[in-house]
Every structure is written in C-alpha cells, then in structure tokens.
Image (tube, rainbow, N blue to C red):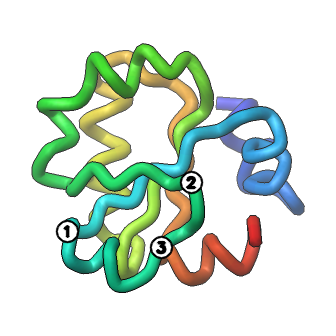
Amino acid sequence: MSWLSNIFGGGGVKQAVSQGAVIIDLRTAYEYDQGHIPHSLNIPVDRIKANIERIKSFRKPIILCCSTGNHCWEAAEVLRNAGVEQVINGGSWQSLWRKVG
C-alpha cells in the first residue's frame, strides 16, 4: 500500500509515467477516437477481464482513466483481484492529460 500512497502524493502520476507506467483509457473506441492521451491504450472497461494477461505482461504500473473516473474504480478492482498490484485511478482522461501532458 505504501507504493500507492506515494503515487497519490504530489507529482505521483508524473513520476509513475516517467518510470514507464502504461495509461489505459477505459472509454469506448468511439470516445477514445474523439480525443485521448497520446500513447495511451484503449481497452474499454467491459474488455478489461479479457485483457488481464496482456495487462499483466506489461510488468509496469497501470494508470486508468475514463470519462469521469467512475469506471476506473471498477477496472482497478478487477485488476487487483487478478494480481496486478500497481494500479492507479487517474480519473477523467482530460484531468490526467493535464497532469502528464
């Protein structure tokens, strides 16, 4: 838990990105195509379970974002239950972009 506490501290998201974190945008493909964080991956929230092995293979911190941040909680729980320990709720993609852009 201390790692997660550090991430939510000042500059934590930027630090995670500088360490190679993978940003996963949970919105639909249509929403993603309307605007997204450069180099983020689009894995809609309803496809997270089907992509667990792929996500685990990254072996990097995962930052989740969506339209409002609500789907991030759901996806984070699925990933943590599957053994992905370094999961960050980045909130809305636009607010996350302001932090990492």
Identity of the amino acid at label 2? His
Circle 1 packing at 10 Å, graded few (<14), some (14-19), many (20+), is some
Identity of the amino acid at label 3? His
Q: How far apart are marks 2 and 3 (CA)?
A: 9 Å
Residue 66: image location, x then y, percent? 37, 70
Sequence order check, earlier mark of 1 and 3: 1
Numbered circle sitting on residue 39 = 2
Relative to 15, 72 lies left or right: left
In the rendered image, the vertical position of residue 70 relative to residue 11, given as above or below: below
Identity of the amino acid at label 1? Thr
Numbered circle sitting on residue 28 = 1
Residue 8: image location, x then y, percent? 72, 55
Residue at 38% x, 27% y: name it. Answer: 55
Number of the front mark, 2 or 1: 2
Residue at 34% x, 84% y: name it. Answer: 34
In the rendered image, the vertical position of residue 60 relative to residue 9, given as above or below: above
Classify mark 1: helix, strand or loop. loop
Q: Quadrant of the image for the N terminus?
A: top right
Q: Distance between the residues labelled 1 and 3?
A: 11 Å
Residue at the spot of label 3: 36
Residue at 74% x, 31% y: name it. Answer: 2
